Image (cartoon, rainbow, N blue to C red):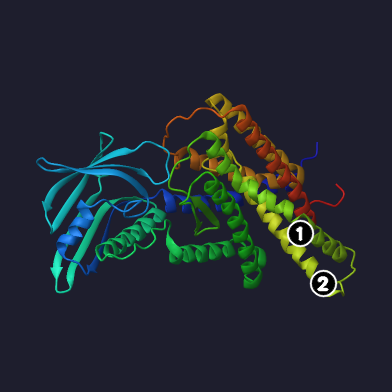
């Protein structure tokens, strides 16, 4: 019996390399969304051309604007309950959510109209908030020569850098809206997300991190490293845009797209999915929309294959400029297809918060079904990868899948959500057909990309 030691060695080398990059990527995800940053303090001060009493009335007496001061909550009513100490009882829910309103109670240990207001979060729907998790808000209003100076300080626990940046931006925007309301001017828009500045920063960090991925392959040549990094970010942007489209389709008006500083991204919405079908549709639309883009690029992929064959048969560079430009566009499209196929197939893994896991969680109505669907999806991905790249390159995917499972099992357990009824037969069939069609498109795309760019599969096999 002949043993292909080179293939076995390649299997483990790819597994080790992919595992390392997966570990780095998962660490950044943890840092952005899961890292416990402790209690953080947000302090903002503004000068308002209005009396302290006017500021007090707008802040605590008059009804808040639609969407609340941050544009994220629908507030049904707010009531001051007298006692020792007095309490503020608010009935609210996420803006655009179809779920029930929640009752939030804040204890007011200090209340001195119109100068001082201290509120400490006490309970949500009757469930006490632990002291270490409670939000503490202090508002001070002082008279000035031209009106009033408002200082608002909020101390609360924060999880993840993304949450910290978002909260900091929300707190600052709240103060600007308060000033406009006190002065009788139109309120600035209350947009969600991290904002343009941080978005550009995260995008730049993502490009730099992507260049590091290709450093070894290009020997430190920065031009091709940058080109491939931009191509990779384009793939990620299309993927997240698919999630974003699905979120908007299902009514998530506040959905945003955020790049992560290590070749990744996330489409984020404030409200949870209203049904299993919605959850599966949003998860599947990332790789599904990317697959539709690849289908639309099919003619352009053909131009790249033609140019590749011309070089393979030593025909040289085409003399016709339009033919050459079409060929170069085709080569770029083939590179895009290679990245899109690899990233989206891996994202369909049935582990952690991958799109495949989210889809299966919504599709399965029991733990047994979840395990069965997970095994079938894992087998389908392995067959698609093995059938094109061969045994040794499956190692990299196994390494990624292993890290994804460890990350999901021990570090990133999604919070428990309210049980939802199973999908209807039509909804389940829609999701299953979409999943099968998506994997099929990527299996075909991988063969085309490998033939045209990576040259790992001999033509005609």
336 relative to 369, above or below: below
Q: Residue 20 in the image: state x and y as whole percent.
A: 56, 52
Is residue 22 found left or right of 436 in the rendered image?
Answer: left
Upstream in the sequence, badge 2 or badge 1?
2
Q: Quadrant of residue 106?
A: top left
Q: Residue at x 54, y 26 (%)?
A: 365
Give the labeled residue for mark 1.
Answer: 453
Q: Residue 28 in the image: state x and y as whole percent.
A: 47, 54
Q: Residue at x 68, y 46 (%)?
A: 11
- Spatial separation of the CA atoms under disc 2 and disc 1: 21 Å
Examine the rendering and report whether any part of residue 44 can be seen: yes
Q: Quadrant of the N terminus?
A: top right
Is residue 244 found left or right of 309 in the rendered image?
Answer: left
Q: Quadrant of residue 225?
A: bottom right
Give the labeled residue for mark 2.
Answer: 322
Q: Residue 266 in the image: state x and y as whole percent.
A: 51, 52
Is residue 12 found left or right of 310 in the rendered image?
Answer: left
Q: Residue at x 56, y 49 (%)?
A: 243
């Amino acid at each position: 019996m002949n043993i292909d030691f080179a293939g076995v060695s390649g299997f483990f080398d790819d597994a080790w390399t992919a595992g390392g990059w997966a570990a780095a990527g998962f660490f950044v995800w943890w840092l952005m969304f899961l890292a416990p940053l402790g209690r953080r303090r947000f302090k903002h001060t503004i000068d308002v051309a209005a009396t302290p009493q006017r500021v007090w009335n707008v802040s605590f007496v008059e009804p808040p604007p639609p969407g609340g001061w941050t544009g994220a909550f629908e507030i049904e009513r707010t009531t001051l309950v007298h006692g020792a100490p007095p309490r503020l009882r608010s009935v609210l829910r996420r803006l655009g959510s179809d779920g029930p309103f929640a009752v939030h109670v804040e204890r007011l240990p200090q209340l001195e109209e119109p100068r001082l207001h201290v509120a400490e979060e006490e309970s949500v729907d009757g469930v006490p908030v632990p002291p270490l998790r409670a939000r503490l808000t202090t508002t001070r209003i002082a008279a000035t020569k031209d009106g009033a100076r408002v200082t608002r300080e909020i101390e609360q626990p924060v999880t993840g850098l993304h949450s910290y940046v978002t909260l900091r931006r929300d707190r600052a925007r709240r103060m600007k809206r308060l000033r406009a309301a006190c002065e009788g001017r139109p309120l600035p828009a209350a947009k969600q997300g991290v904002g343009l500045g941080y978005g550009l920063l995260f995008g730049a960090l993502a490009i730099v991190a992507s260049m590091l991925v290709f450093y070894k392959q290009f020997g430190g040549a920065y031009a091709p490293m940058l080109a491939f990094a931009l191509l990779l970010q384009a793939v990620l942007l299309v993927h997240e845009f698919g999630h974003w489209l699905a979120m908007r389709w299902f009514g998530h008006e506040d959905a945003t797209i955020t790049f992560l500083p290590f070749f990744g991204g996330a489409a984020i919405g404030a409200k949870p999915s209203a049904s299993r079908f919605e959850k599966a549709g949003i998860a599947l639309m990332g790789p599904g929309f990317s697959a539709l883009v690849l289908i639309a690029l099919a003619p352009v992929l053909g131009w790249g294959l033609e140019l590749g064959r011309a070089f393979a048969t030593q025909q040289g560079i085409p003399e016709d400029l339009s033919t050459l430009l079409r060929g170069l566009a085709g080569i770029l499209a083939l590179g895009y297809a290679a990245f899109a196929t690899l990233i989206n197939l891996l994202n369909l893994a049935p582990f952690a918060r991958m799109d495949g896991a989210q889809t299966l969680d919504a599709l399965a109505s029991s733990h047994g079904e979840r395990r069965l669907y997970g095994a079938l999806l894992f087998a389908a991905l392995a067959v698609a990868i093995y059938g094109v790249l061969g045994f040794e390159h499956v190692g990299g995917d196994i390494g990624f899948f292993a890290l994804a499972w460890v990350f999901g099992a021990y570090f990133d357990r999604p919070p428990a959500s309210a049980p939802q009824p199973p999908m209807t037969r039509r909804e389940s069939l829609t999701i299953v057909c979409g999943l099968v069609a998506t994997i099929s498109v990527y299996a075909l795309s991988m063969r085309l990309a490998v033939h045209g760019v990576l040259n790992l599969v001999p033509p005609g096999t």
